[in-house]
Amino acid sequence: MLNKEKSNHQPLSHLDWLESEAIYILREVAGQCSNPVLLFSGGKDSLCILRLAEKAFRPGRFPFPLMHIDTGHNYQEVIDFRDQRAAELGERLIVRSVEDSMKRGTVVLKSADESRNKHQSVTLLEAIEEFGFDCCIGGARRDEEKARAKERIMSFRDEFGQWDPKNQRPELWSLYNARSHKGENIRAFPISNWTEMDVWQYIEREKLQLPSIYFAHQRDVVMRAGSIVPVNVPLVNGEVTNPVKAGEEIIKMQVRFRTVGDISCTAPVISDADTVSKIVLETATSTITERGATRLDDQTSDASMEQRKKEGYF
Amino acid sequence: MTTQHNDSLLRFMTCGSVDDGKSTLIGRLLFDTKTILADTLTQISNTSKKRGMEAVDLSLLTDGLQAEREQGITIDVAYRYFSTGTRKYIIADAPGHEQYTRNMVTAASTANLAIILIDARRGVLTQTRRHSYLAHLVGIQHIVVAVNKMDLVNYDQATYEKICSDYLTFANEIGFAQARDIKFIPISALAGDMLVDRLENMPWYTSETLLEMLEKAPAAHTEGDEEFRFPVQFVCRPHASADADLHDFRGFMGRIESGNIAVGDAVTVLPNGYQSKVKAIQIGDEQLQSAQTEQSITLLLEDEIDTSRGDMIVKTGSTIEPVKQIEAFVCWLSETPLSPARTYVIRHTTRESKAKVGTIAYKVDVNTLEEQATTDLKMNDIARITFKLAQPLMIDSYNTNRATGAFIVIDESTNNTVGAGMIV
């Protein structure tokens, strides 16, 4: 298809530019690293990265497997979607589970209902060691959180998976340095420069399929400390998580999820947006940030994300 | 409201120190373009109250890390995003202190425009000269000199004009005024004068507001006629595929760093000099007849040519030769000084070569711009250096092509990026 506008040296649209940058970053990972892996949760950001990887590497296969660190507390719809998408692409999916780390005794919960979200770091580091991965590609974005605003596109982690914000490699032009010694690790973030709005616009443009919980649906929730908390959520293993606490009243609400993660720390927002274009409009007029609205784990302190990242989190 | 898929994108940086109101300027831009959402605003107004401030301190928006909040300073480049109806912006927010020359160079490396902040009460200072020199060195084409804190000089036109004329005098001295597009604007970031809203305090200033300047600045690579440069990042050979049509598929994957290319164009692959023609251009499964700067594509050639990552595809007849020695301005980024005895790795486009220092001609004092003889190079120093290379590199001068004129220096013992080079 001849695109006259492009050959006339018009600047790329911002989505084309971001797409091109992300493809470039994925290819740099493939060119520089010997054993990379793409972290894939079934969430919207990682689904964008899968599309970008198709554009970067087809008709070849992806030069890396996909991997999910499963807390065991994920929504069934998302897990099903994850498996379906990996199968459609014909790419290898590795799943490593926080529950296995708990069985090994490397993850110890303070209480049974403690969020397993931050414990993903332990399982991730164990998987990195098991497979000898030298680079993990993730979907983190700089606009999500202030500790991420200073994150590099190729971010160096030491043998303990630690991020040292005061000692990051300078990153100039698009000359990314993804070198590491054995045992060390690079985290690569191809959509660093994307905002939540860019992600939704890209999903709309590329007509990407998403797990159903991103769209408005009826759900049993309670109000807990000012947040909407889904309750009695069935798990993949047949158990039910997030029981109602004494004195709480179950309400049926029309909600959708803006981010999808561990059930214990991801809250939905009230919404009627049941299509991608309605979500794009809702995002444009939203008055609350993505994590502010939905991530219970970031509200504990001003620096909670920074702290988790230092410990090996994304 | 319609969704805006065809916005262009502008990357710019802000140069100045906390004292110049840089954080307030960025906070104000984000706030006035409605990028700041309610929960973030609540968070920073709580923090402002805790610190005993009367008004919301917009500079808190750019306070990134715990360590920075503790020390009340910015120690690293942060990236911020906002968008208007027509454009998406990426701001590189770099600390302006002398010790952070390396951060300024980092921020400048991806910017097309720089806002240089001057405190209206203090005028053109040493740091203004430093920021301007660095913006110039790193090849930023568009400079906006923003004279801030106009509210503290009673919005006085004469004060503003004196600063503009002082700045031009200095810019002419370093040959900067001729080479770059320079604009001036009086602002008050604190009050929001002339950023997004014009307000009524400076009726004598009738030119563009800051946001209007940003909206009109050319995006990258819409200027000039650069030659086609295509460093190969990755070669796609799905020969084991079940699809028989793919057995001979050989796709050269990369991003067009400059110029454009069309199906049928004659190309040469460097450094070997093999020649062929473009058979097809693809992005994913989409077939293109032509492609341009900044597009990540897959190129298929008519002939089977042995090509790998690090090679560069150019149009046949292009003026570029593989070289084994380069001369460059290098900004040293590492706490460990440069050692002329050691071998480093240079990464240029997608190619790497071992490199040794040949000669250090001089270093530049970033405050006085004086050239000084030197034998060593410490963090934040900038010097003119030659390197001898083990492998040939396909280079352009940085002034003609930022992508093929830039390189980084890597210390293999730590794998750290220790230097940033701009080829003369």
Image: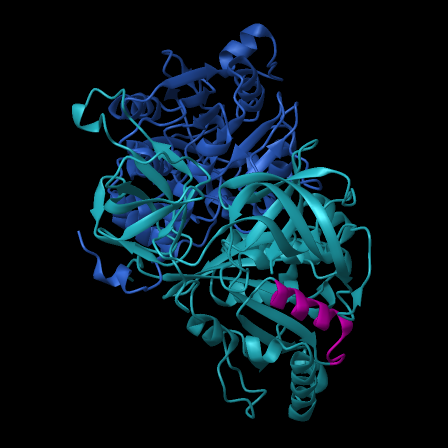
Chain colours: A blue, B cyan
Query: Does the segment drawn in magenta span residue A196?
Result: no
Quick check: A49 left or right of A156? left
Compared to B201, does B15 lie above or below?
above
Whether residue B418 is visible to the viewer of this picture, yes or no, is yes
- Picture residue at 31% right of the left edge, 54% below the top: A281
Residue B142 in percent (x, y) is at 53, 71
Magenta portion: prevailing SS class: helix
Using the image as rendered, state which of residue B283 and residue B235 is in the foreground: B235
Residue A132 in percent (x, y) is at 54, 17
Which quadrant holds the N terminus of chain B? bottom left
Using the image as rendered, state which of residue A182 and residue A232 is in the foreground: A182
Which quadrant holds the C terminus of chain B? bottom right
Residue B353 in percent (x, y) is at 58, 39
Q: What stretch is highlighted in magenta?
A: B121-137
Locate residue B185: give its quadrant. Answer: bottom right
Query: Does the segment drawn in magenta span residue B126?
Result: yes
Residue A229 in percent (x, y) is at 44, 32
- Picture residue at 36% right of the left edge, 29% below the top: A42
Using the image as rendered, state which of residue A264 and residue A35 is in the foreground: A35
Whether residue A251 is visible to the viewer of this picture, yes or no, is no
Compared to B312, does A39 lie above or below?
above
Quick check: A96 left or right of A255? right
Using the image as rendered, state which of residue B95 and residue B211 is in the foreground: B95
Compared to B61, does A74 lie above or below?
above
Quick check: B343 left or right of B237? right
Locate residue A275: give its quadrant. Answer: top left
Q: Which residue lies furthest to the top in this view?
A: A104
